[in-house]
């Protein structure tokens, strides 16, 4: 049974090198997104790429999984910052998304580095987008953000 089903449509015109696409999603507030081959491999100039969208999906999914796992331990983060960097490279002559690196930082009162590392590893196993990237090299680095001393 499905938990959720979402969709997007890309309309593409012309060849790969000279072409242009427009991505449309059903979510209100997300405008049409321009995409080109050049936006994947050169300066995006305000356009997106599949890799950027994959990074957005991975960082948001991981943040949700981490929030869930932290709640299960009885703690609530004051902030989680999750960055994802997705890499497209040539593998055996074919462009391939080869890796996604997650940098997870959290400000969580009452949690030490060891406890955070454990919860992060559980979140990595839970995140559906991490499992989608199972053929890629998915790396997760986690850091607790220390509270600054009050003056």
Image (cartoon, rainbow, N blue to C red):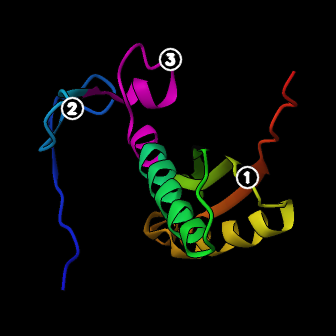
| Crowding at mark 3 (Cα within 10 Å: few <14, some 14-19, many 20+) | few
Q: Which residue is mark 3?
A: 43
| Crowding at mark 1 (Cα within 10 Å: few <14, some 14-19, many 20+) | some
- C-alpha distance separating marks 1 and 2: 34 Å
Q: Is residue 108 left or right of residue 67?
A: right
Q: Is residue 127 left or right of residue 121?
A: left
Whether residue 20 can be seen here:
no
Q: Which mark is residue 109?
A: 1
- Pointers 3 and 2 in contact (C-beta within 8 Å): no
Residue positioned 67% across, 50% down in the render? 104
Whether residue 87 can be seen here:
yes
Quarter of the image for the C terminus: give it: top right
- C-alpha distance separating marks 3 and 2: 22 Å
Does the magenta run of residues contain 49?
yes
The residue most toward the bottom is 1
Q: Secondary structure at mark 3?
A: loop
Q: Which residues are magenta?
A: 34-54
Question: Which quadrant would residue 134 be assigned to in this image?
Answer: bottom right
Q: Is residue 128 left or right of residue 16?
A: right
Q: Which residue is mark 2?
A: 30
The residue most toward the top is 45
**Image x and y of residue 79, in percent:** 60, 43
Q: Nearer the viewer, mark 3 or mark 2?
A: 2
Closest to the observer, 142 or 15? 142
Residue positioned 52% across, 58% down in the render? 62
- Pointers 1 and 3 in contact (C-beta within 8 Å): no
Residue 51's place in the image compared with 17, above or below, is below
Residue 39's place in the image compared with 76, above or below, is above
First of labels 1, 3 by sequence position: 3
Residue positioned 17% across, 28% down in the render? 32
Question: Which quadrant would residue 135 be assigned to in this image?
Answer: bottom right
């Amino acid at each position: 049974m499905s938990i959720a089903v979402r969709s997007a449509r890309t309309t593409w015109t012309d060849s790969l090198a000279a072409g242009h696409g427009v991505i449309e999603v059903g979510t209100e507030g997300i405008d049409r997104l321009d995409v080109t081959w050049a936006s994947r491999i050169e300066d995006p100039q305000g356009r997106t790429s599949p890799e950027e969208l994959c990074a957005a999906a991975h960082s948001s999914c991981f943040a949700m999984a981490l929030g869930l796992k932290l709640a299960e331990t009885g703690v609530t983060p004051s902030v989680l910052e999750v960055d994802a960097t997705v890499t497209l490279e040539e593998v055996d002559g074919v462009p391939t998304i080869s890796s996604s690196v997650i940098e997870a930082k959290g400000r969580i009162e009452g949690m030490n580095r060891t406890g955070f590392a454990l919860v992060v590893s559980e979140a990595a196993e839970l995140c559906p987008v991490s499992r989608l990237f199972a053929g890629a090299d998915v790396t997760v680095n986690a850091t607790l953000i220390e509270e600054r001393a009050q003056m």
